[in-house]
């Protein structure tokens, strides 16, 4: 598979590093609207062809798939162009900025017969995959209650860089720049994590979104800082279970932590992903009577990059698919309506 990297910013490095390790995959081109960034990226990853626009890359056309690593609002127009040109697409999350656009992309890729997958990174966590397998095998019985959180601290820490001056953080704070805040950025991950790990769909959402004051007038240069920084959701799942899902960019002390606890009528699991490392604990069987938790060993799992390469080779989309991402997007859209109108919103 010959792959073109579209958008050569921070996350594109992970795409290049992961795809270049897969046998049969070659990085043949890069595209970015910032020439110096593009040149440095292509030089670092040994990419021969550079394009200042996706249109120019499409005219050249000598690639099979696009890794779309542009900012969120650029995913929809460029992915639609890629699909029209007959390319497979591995798109960054969120697939689009709302469910209508995400569903349009889903319908288009399915109609084209090409592979369309989305990088829900935390699916690469062995603990999540093993935890889900335990839930689906009935080891914790019927799920009754689910707690999920995704916590980051880049708004209150310098460890990730300076959000007040770097464009890669500033666009994430501005709806005009296509960001749906913490909800669109990490909410999409934790809603997928909670739903995938519990094996359940979210049926209703009641949400509260919060945007904190961060600068004089909440404006820095061209960026109006109006996108949400934290959210909480109360959700009902398809089987009648209830739960909470929350996320924040202001959680001092957490670089990138996802936590999922799934409680059933026969036992419970806890999945923790913390800045690259994941662990699974379970309290099942007679351990429930002493509330004893044991760590569960987990085998390594394939990455989304490997799954995408295998899917293109086989000519069949694997999960996480565009359709899955569009369905998760419906829950985020439901959360926005819920917050605005202070009401419970059906999302199934
Ligand atoms: N899966 C994950 O865990 C994860 C982690 C980080 C970022 N992301 C996603 O990856 C995407 C990129 O994020 P990032 O952190 O790399 O942002 P970034 O701002 O560092 O990089 C985006 C790049 O796209 C370029 N770009 C903008 N418009 C373009 C266009 N029309 N054509 C070509 N290039 C264009 C920018 O110049 C920039 O270099 C976002 O959608 C983000 O949500 C996902």
Image (spheres, rainbow, N blue to C red):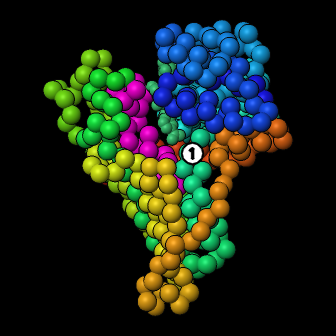
Residue that numbered label 1 is attached to: 120
Q: Which residues are magenta?
A: 168-193
Between 15 and 89, which is closer to the camera in this rendering? 15
x, y percentage for residue 242?
Answer: 45, 68
Reply above or below: 32 against 212: above
x, y percentage for residue 114?
Answer: 77, 33
x, y percentage for residue 76?
Answer: 57, 27
Reply above or below: 28 against 196: above
Is 9 in the magenta?
no
**Residue displayed at 52% across by 44% down:** 329
Between 12 and 145, which is closer to the camera in this rendering? 12
Compared across the picture, whether 149 is left or right of 18 comes to: left
In which quarter of the view is residue 244 placed?
Answer: bottom left
Between 270 and 334, which is closer to the camera in this rendering? 270
**Quadrant in which the C terminus is drawn:** bottom right
Number of numbered discs overlaid on the protein picture: 1
For disc 1, does the CB lie below 8 Å from ligand 1? yes
């Amino acid at each position: 598979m010959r792959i073109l990297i579209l958008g050569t910013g921070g996350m594109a490095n992970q795409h290049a590093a992961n795809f270049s390790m897969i046998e049969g995959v070659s990085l043949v081109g890069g595209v970015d609207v910032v020439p110096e960034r593009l040149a440095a990226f292509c030089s670092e990853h040994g990419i021969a062809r550079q394009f200042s626009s996706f249109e120019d890359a499409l005219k050249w056309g000598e690639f099979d798939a696009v890794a779309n690593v542009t900012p969120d609002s650029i995913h929809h127009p460029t992915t639609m162009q890629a699909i029209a040109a007959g390319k497979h697409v591995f798109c960054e999350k969120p697939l689009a900025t709302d469910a209508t656009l995400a569903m349009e992309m889903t319908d288009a890729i399915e109609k084209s017969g090409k592979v369309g997958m989305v990088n829900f990174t935390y699916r690469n966590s062995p603990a999540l995959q093993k935890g889900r397998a335990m839930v689906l095998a009935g080891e914790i019985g019927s799920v009754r209650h689910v707690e999920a959180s995704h916590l980051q601290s880049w708004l209150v820490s310098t460890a990730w860089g300076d959000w007040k001056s770097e464009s890669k953080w500033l666009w994430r704070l501005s709806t005009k720049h296509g960001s749906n805040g913490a909800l669109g950025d990490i909410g999409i991950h934790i809603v997928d994590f909670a739903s995938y790990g519990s094996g359940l769909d979210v049926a209703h959402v009641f949400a509260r979104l919060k945007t904190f004051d961060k600068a004089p007038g909440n404006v820095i240069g061209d960026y109006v800082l109006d996108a949400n920084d934290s959210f909480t959701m109360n959700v009902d799942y398809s089987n009648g279970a209830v739960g909470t899902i929350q996320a924040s960019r202001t959680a001092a002390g957490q670089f990138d932590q996802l936590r999922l606890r799934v409680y059933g009528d026969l036992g419970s699991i806890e999945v923790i992903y913390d800045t690259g490392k994941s662990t699974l604990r379970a309290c099942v069987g007679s351990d429930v009577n002493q509330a004893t938790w044991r760590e569960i060993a987990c085998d390594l799992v394939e990455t989304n990059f490997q799954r995408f390469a295998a899917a293109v080779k086989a000519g069949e989309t694997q999960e996480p698919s565009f359709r899955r991402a569009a369905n998760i997007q419906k829950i985020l859209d439901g959360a926005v309506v819920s917050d605005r109108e202070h009401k419970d919103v059906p999302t199934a």
